[in-house]
């Protein structure tokens, strides 16, 4: 079990305080985003874990509004980049420009791109070319970028919440596997229930609008993220995480038979890291001091789905990733 550097009473007090703030954050977000409680919870979990999130859904499901709302309630400096086919890497990262002083001296000056923010919304990320998509790779993993051979640190905290249209739509490019692995979770945004959509209809076509305010700031968010890492995680939970990940790798001795038959490739070590942080963040959101095996199984789909690929034969047979992840979760629960 992981050690806690502070006294138990102090950690309990911090968990209670953080849980109360998280309730306020969820209430503020829910006052603007209707009928998407699971999506809000996963987005909060992703940020509390210190990671990046990929929101997938058809247009019009409030993905953009969700990111803007989270930026406000977390008190983060946020920027939005609309990804288009003609977007260049320098449009995101920034570029060196040659300037001439009053004395005639010439020198290069770096002009920062929109990536220099605490919360970057990469809107419709799969509309851009793979070259531009990959411009985010180093930033998402290392929290700094290199332009013209010079490194530049990004603000802290730094998070990317990207929205993506379903790949079946025209004019989209699949994200490369290396970049998908940088996203801690894939958050599927589905159509709201009828009553939620009714509320959307009334609230968005009238004259009144809900205004939201910051609940915490960047420093408080980083303190919460540190608290997530301090929460204890039992050996049984660690074993459950490792079993889940290792059984999802085709070709390995531990893989489930259906995995070997249906998957082209499976999750790497980052998936285990994402689950380890995610289950603790989920416990904190619920006001609990430590995660359970139920947390591991609940997060299996958003953590694994974008880190697995079906073979062509499996797709022709109608096998889905959801089915395989359900089998993985069952195998861990029954172990």
Image (spheres, rainbow, N blue to C red):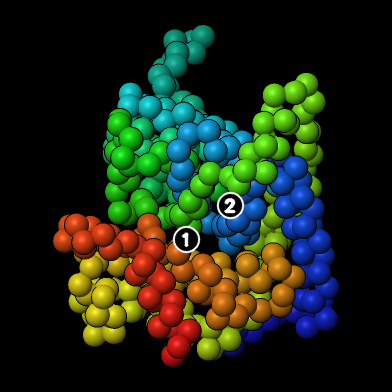
> Percent position (x, y) of residue 135?
37, 40
Q: Residue at x 34, y 78 (%)?
A: 246
Q: Total label count?
A: 2
- Of 38 and 223, nearer the camera is 38
> Percent position (x, y) of residue 315?
23, 58
Secondary structure beneath dot 1 equals helix
Q: Residue at x 58, y 37 (%)?
A: 62
How far is mark 2 from mark 1, CA to CA?
Answer: 10 Å
Residue at which label 1 appears:
302
For residue 329, which quarter of the picture?
Answer: bottom left
Viewport quadrant of the C terminus: bottom left
Q: Residue at x 52, y 74 (%)?
A: 296
Viewport quadrant of the N terminus: bottom right
**For residue 39, which numbered disc appears in the image?**
2
Secondary structure beneath dot 2 equals helix
User: Relative to 37, does residue 69 appear above or below in the rendering?
Assistant: above
Task: Answer whether residue 73 is visible to the viewer in this image.
Answer: no
10 Å crowding of disc 2: few (<14), some (14-19), many (20+): some
10 Å crowding of disc 1: few (<14), some (14-19), many (20+): some
Give the residue at the far front of this rendering.
194
User: Relative to 3, does residue 182 appear above or below in the rendering?
Assistant: above
Task: Answer whether residue 301 is visible to the viewer in this image.
Answer: yes
- Of 262 and 186, nearer the camera is 262
Q: Residue at x 78, y 33 (%)?
A: 210
> Percent position (x, y) of residue 323?
36, 67
Sequence-first disc among 2 and 1: 2
């Amino acid at each position: 079990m992981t050690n806690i550097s502070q006294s138990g009473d102090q950690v309990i007090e911090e968990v209670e305080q953080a849980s109360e703030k998280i309730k306020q954050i969820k209430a503020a977000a829910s006052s603007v985003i209707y009928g998407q409680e699971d999506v809000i919870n996963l987005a909060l979990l992703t940020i509390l874990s210190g990671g990046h999130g990929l929101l997938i859904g058809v247009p019009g499901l409030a993905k953009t509004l969700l990111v803007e709302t989270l930026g406000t309630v977390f008190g983060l400096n946020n920027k939005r980049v609309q990804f288009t086919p003609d977007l260049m890497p320098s449009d995101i990262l920034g570029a060196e420009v040659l300037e001439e002083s009053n004395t005639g001296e010439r020198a290069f000056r770096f002009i920062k791109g929109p990536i220099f923010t605490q919360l970057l919304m990469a809107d419709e990320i799969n509309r851009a070319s793979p070259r531009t998509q990959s411009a985010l790779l180093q930033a998402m993993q290392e929290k700094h970028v290199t332009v013209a051979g010079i490194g530049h640190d990004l603000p802290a905290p730094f998070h990317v919440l990207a929205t993506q249209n379903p790949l079946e739509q025209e004019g989209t490019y699949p994200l490369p596997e290396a970049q998908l692995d940088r996203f801690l979770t894939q958050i599927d945004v589905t159509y709201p229930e009828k009553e939620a959509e009714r509320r959307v209809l009334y609230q968005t076509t009238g004259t009144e609008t809900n205004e939201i305010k910051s609940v915490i700031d960047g420093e408080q968010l980083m303190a919460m993220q540190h608290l997530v890492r301090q929460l204890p995680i039992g050996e049984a939970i660690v074993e459950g995480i490792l079993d889940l990940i290792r059984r999802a790798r085709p070709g390995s001795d531990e893989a489930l038979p259906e995995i070997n038959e249906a998957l082209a490739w499976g999750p790497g070590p980052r998936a285990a890291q994402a689950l380890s942080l995610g289950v603790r963040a989920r416990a904190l959101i619920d006001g609990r001091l430590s995660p359970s095996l139920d947390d591991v199984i609940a997060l299996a789909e958003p953590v694994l789905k974008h880190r697995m690929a079906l073979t062509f034969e499996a797709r022709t047979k109608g096998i889905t990733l959801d089915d395989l992840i359900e089998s993985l979760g069952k195998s861990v629960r029954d172990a």
